[in-house]
Image: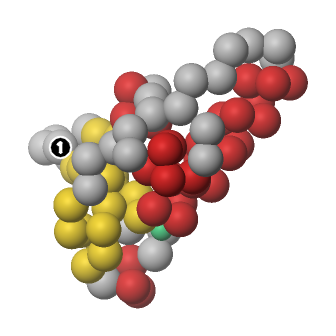
């Protein structure tokens, strides 16, 4: 699976990447929902670069554990 195929598994909208807030509004996808102790819900969004990096890490971790790797599930974890 190439990078573009991985990216195609996600829905992209303009937003602020949690690792690159200085970049401002870029194409991002929702990867996590945080419930802060203070209450409410905070959406964590990541840009394409970060999603590919996180998928890469998951792929490596799955391979080390001998598990099947399935991309496109960042938001489900
Ligand atoms: Zn980013």
**For the point 21% across and 68% down, which residue is it?**
14
Q: What element carries label 1?
A: loop
Quadrant in which the C terminus appears: top left
Compared with 71, 55 (above or below) is below
Extreme-top residue of the structure: 67
Name the residue beneath numbered marker 1.
41
Left or right of residue 68: residue 5: left
Quadrant in which the N terminus appears: top right
Frontmost residue, 36 versus 24: 24
Extreme-left residue of the structure: 40
Q: Measuring from the top left, give residue 32's x and y in whole percent.
A: 35, 41
Left or right of residue 28: residue 49: right
Compared with 36, 61 (above or below) is above
**For the point 74% across and 24% down, which residue is it?**
62
Left or right of residue 50: residue 59: right
Compared with 23, 51 (above or below) is above
Frontmost residue, 2 versus 34: 2
Residue 40 visible in the picture: yes
Left or right of residue 69: residue 35: left
**For the point 78% across and 35% down, which residue is it?**
60
Q: Quadrant of residue 26?
A: bottom left
Residue 30 visible in the picture: no
**For the point 29% across and 40% down, which residue is it?**
33
Q: Measuring from the top left, give residue 8's x and y in whole percent.
A: 38, 46
Q: How many neighbours does mark 1 have within 10 angstroms: few (below 14), some (14-19), or many (20 or more)?
A: few
Compared with 11, 26 (above or below) is below
């Amino acid at each position: 699976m190439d990078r573009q195929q991985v990216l195609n598994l996600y829905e992209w909208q303009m937003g602020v990447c949690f690792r690159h807030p200085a970049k401002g509004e870029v194409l991002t996808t929702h990867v996590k929902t945080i419930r802060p102790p203070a209450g409410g819900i905070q959406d964590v969004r990541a840009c394409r670069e970060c999603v590919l990096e996180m998928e890469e890490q998951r792929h490596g971790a799955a391979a080390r554990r001998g598990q099947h790797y399935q991309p496109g599930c960042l938001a489900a974890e």
